[in-house]
Image (spheres, rainbow, N blue to C red):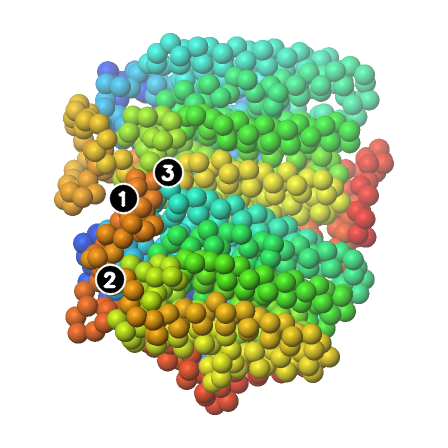
Amino acid sequence: MSGGAALVVLLLATSLVTAAVTFVLPEHREAVRNAVNVGGALLKVLLTSLLVFGVFTGAEFEWRVAFLPGADLVLRADPIPLLFVFLSALLWLTTTVYAIGYRAGDGRSSRFFGFFGLCASMAVGIALAGNLVTFLIFYELLTVATYPLVVHGGGQRARLGGRTYVAYATAGGAALLFGTAWLQHLVGSTEFGDPATVTAVATEQPLAMTAVFLVLITGLAVKAVLVPLHGWLPKAMVAPAPVSALLHAVAVVKAGVYGIVRVVHDLYGMALVDELGALTPLAVVATVTIVYGSLRALTRDDLKGRLAYSTVSQLSYIVLGVSVFGLTSTTGGLVHLVHQGIMKVTLFYGAGILDRQLGVTRASQMDGVGRRLPLTMAAFTVAALGMIGFPPTVGFVSKYYLGMGAVEAGQPWVVAVLAISGALNASYFLPLIARAWFRPAGEPADAEVVAEEGDNRVGMTTATSDDAVPPGPAPTRGRWETDRWLLLPTLSTGASVLALGVLAGAPGSPLTWAAFIAEELMQP
Amino acid sequence: MSWWLALVIVLPVGGSVLTSFARGRPGPVVPLGIAAATTAATVGLTAAYFTGGTPGGARLAGPAALELTVLADGLAVAMLLMTSVTALAVTAFGAVEDRRAPRDRHPGHWPLWFGLWAALHLLFLAADLLTAYLMFEAVGTAAAVLVVLGGERRRFLAGTRYLYAELASSVTALLGIALIWREVGDLAYSAIGPALTDAPAGWWAIGLLTTGLLMKVPLVPLHLWLPSAHSLAPSAVSPMLSGVVVKTAFVVLVRLWFGGDGEVLTPSAAQLLGGLGVVAIVWGSLAALRADGVKELIAYSTLAQLGLLFLVPPLVEAGASNAWTGGLFHAVAHAPAKAALLLAASVLVADTGRSSVEGLIGSAARRPMATLAIGIAAVSLVGLPPSAGFVGKWFLLLASIEVGQWWWVLPNAGGSLLTVAYLMRLIRPAFAPPPARVGPPPARVGPPPGTSGDSTTPVDTAEASPITSARDLRDGIALALAATTLALGLSPAGLLGLLEAAAPLGTVTVGPVGTLAATASWLQGLLEITPVPGLLETTPAPGWLA
């Protein structure tokens, strides 16, 4: 095995080994478990940096082993995968730290962190997959590995959420499998980064190849929560906050969108998809999803539900960027892959702290929380403003490129969609921010008192059917407004929402990266 | 080669004799030793097959035309591996049970068990219908008695019913075999050819034989004996029944249909069989969705999984040898997955003493290893990559697309979804909180745990449940068996090679140009291997894509 191949395998193995070690650790070895998990995540960031450095100096990173006839197992570090690997490695580190602070394991931490690490390796596998078969393997495994996390609470609601999740995910997986097999049959290989072969087959059999595209996108759309296949996401919100952050920012839904990106850019090639006439329908679906998700988010009072519908909407920006032909919009779509992850993860961290520290789970309970948790809410506010698209956050950068790209491509209606969606985003995020900062604290804050509230929270913990393992005590505060393990990740992602927006033009930023990739893709 | 061939039969037969003459009960070491030796012999046979390159065979007995013959071709070797690996795990499981509760084991168990094992080996190796028939009798009888041994009345009834079904199917099959003997004068699979298929009596023979064997598989609607026998059998027997024994008749069927050079299956008959397979998938899955008991659910799941095998006849008949590979891979892959599922489920259910699905509540916390085994087995049974179950489904899917018989895609993919639906009934309760302090704690009447070292007492009282979370080796055995499906799924090349070597037609690989190339290479293979003009009339339409 060459050095390049070893690095790719090592990257996958870090999280796998972390998971394996964590699984066998006894429950009470908390310090060891935390050290192993944070250490594994740090090592992964290090390896990823090495990989990025290597790719930019022109090294090849590919690991290939025979699997099925005509379909090898391939892991390869191309530019687009690197973007995703880097995002997932960084957010994994922060989310691991956050999960430790959140005490998400609730007495079953070894299991929790074990599956957490397993998800991390599946995400790397998805990112680096060099052909559709390899992608499919990790895509399906991700479903298996996330299920125990979604149902971690163990209550009736958690298990119902898990059931919905599995039903949707396996149906989507079946469609993806069928599409993959069909493509394998028609083309003879499913390698990414070789659109010429696919194009050659497609000129002979345009109808069949369009159908394959449709099947593949339908399969991926389930995880990418494109309307009308989005129903599982709001129900899977019962998972602990770190899991939700993970599902929404890097793992599950991102895997779906990332799959769409790769199918369009690396498998078919954008020109071919355009020629087959599939880009415009995709753009329409994305538009509908953007508007529908925002509208539904308006109606939700529970914080996590609102954030979930916001995810539904935001992810489709990426799909929109993919489906508008042109350099600028492609850049916008790719960069939003990273930007949405950072913003969303910050929002979920904030929501988790609100829940853990104050027992606040609803928008209507957020009055005055800014005074109690100023740093948390500052990060939350920045991320929310980013979601709306205020400059100089990363959200603005994405939207700017998407809008410009649409105008360049002669599709100005996209700008209108972006404007409408921005207005809708503002109308469900701004009230939260206003409540948090400008309203007097209406309810007695702090978790000790929350138990007296006759609200849903009490019903959840006392009713036998729900949340079988009651959440642990509120985290120790120490000198800070909340546990440092919770605060630190939140602040760092919140800060990067700003920093990456301000420094969008700097070399090495996600934007320059995405622009570089887009230029490569657009070269005939 | 012939040495190994002798060993894989002599060793389990010897084991049967040894355990029946052992004073009292043989204890855990003897069965385990025999099982390990037999498995080693099977591995040796496989190695010899791969190095030798040609199948080895032997004439056992009998006059020239009515002799007992065995042939270790790729298919037989694959099936022997499946049998040995599964049986080794189940034997180990039984040995641990023996150590925990020696008095629960009927003295007749191990002799019959090894007898069953030997008969299974011979049945898969059989190169003619007579050997196969005799071994069917042996397998059926041994299996039925193993179901009954040491059990109460319900088990007796289930076993008897099983035996009757075996007898009825055997008589039907025997009629068919007798007719074949009258028409052809030779019972070797390779002799089944135009001489048989051209004669009207030949069709009766094939029809009767097929019907008899379908009942043994069983295929819906001939399955009525299976659910009770498989769900009531002892935990060290049912994995073998559901995993391995059900494959015997299917292997003989594909040898009958595709082993000779005659056109045994007409396109319409093949389509009918495929249709029955779909019915089995749907029926078995729906019944599994409604079943109360865990083992009952798994038994119905077996019916559904067997249904998928019957996509093989229409697809292979249409010329897709991917279907041969895929179908038989599925048959092999199903064995360890199903056996691991049954082993793990029986451990979990025995803990709570409730055989219903609720008996699994909180298993993830109680017995994580057994629960993980269920999870991995489920992944393979559903057919998710990278498990062995995926490889089988993948090839069947490719085959359906390849020959343009799109209607088989739906049962394949839909069957997976149904499998998810009913297996989630086993996995969902696993993550529920353990039933803490419901009812009085059970009296500690269980047998003294023979295992030492892992007597971790649950300290945290908040989580403590009345069910002891003592783990034993059985969880590990189930997990190891389940893990073989992952290993097989990650490196399927060896098994694929074995199966492809035994494929009836030239191997059709999916060429880069697609359907046309596939059809062309299929035709080429057909012309080289079986120059029968009649076959060409059944050339499949290359599909609407070409």
- The chain ID associated with circle 2 is A
A78 or A390: nearer the viewer: A390
Please rate how many residues cluster around mark 3, counting C-alpha atoms within 10 Å: few if below 14, some from 14 to 19, many from 20.
Answer: many
Please rate how many residues cluster around mark 1, counting C-alpha atoms within 10 Å: few if below 14, some from 14 to 19, many from 20.
Answer: few
> What residue did someone put label 3 on?
B429
Q: Mark yes or no: residue A22 visible.
A: no
Q: Is residue B389 above or below residue A368?
A: above
Residue A426, horizontal then vertical, whole percent: 50, 72
Q: In this image, B268 relative to A140: left or right?
A: right
Q: How much space separates mark 2 and mark 1, taking CA atoms?
A: 21 Å
The residue shown at (55%, 31%) is: B285
Identify residue type, mark 3.
Answer: Pro
Q: Earlier in the sequence, mark 2 or mark 1?
A: 2
> What residue did someone put label 1 on?
A462
Q: In this image, A24 relative to B209: left or right?
A: left
Q: How much space separates mark 2 and mark 3, taking CA atoms?
A: 38 Å
Q: Tell me the quadrant of the picture where the N terminus of chain A can be found.
A: bottom left
> What residue did someone put label 2 on?
A444
Q: Secondary structure at mark 3?
A: helix
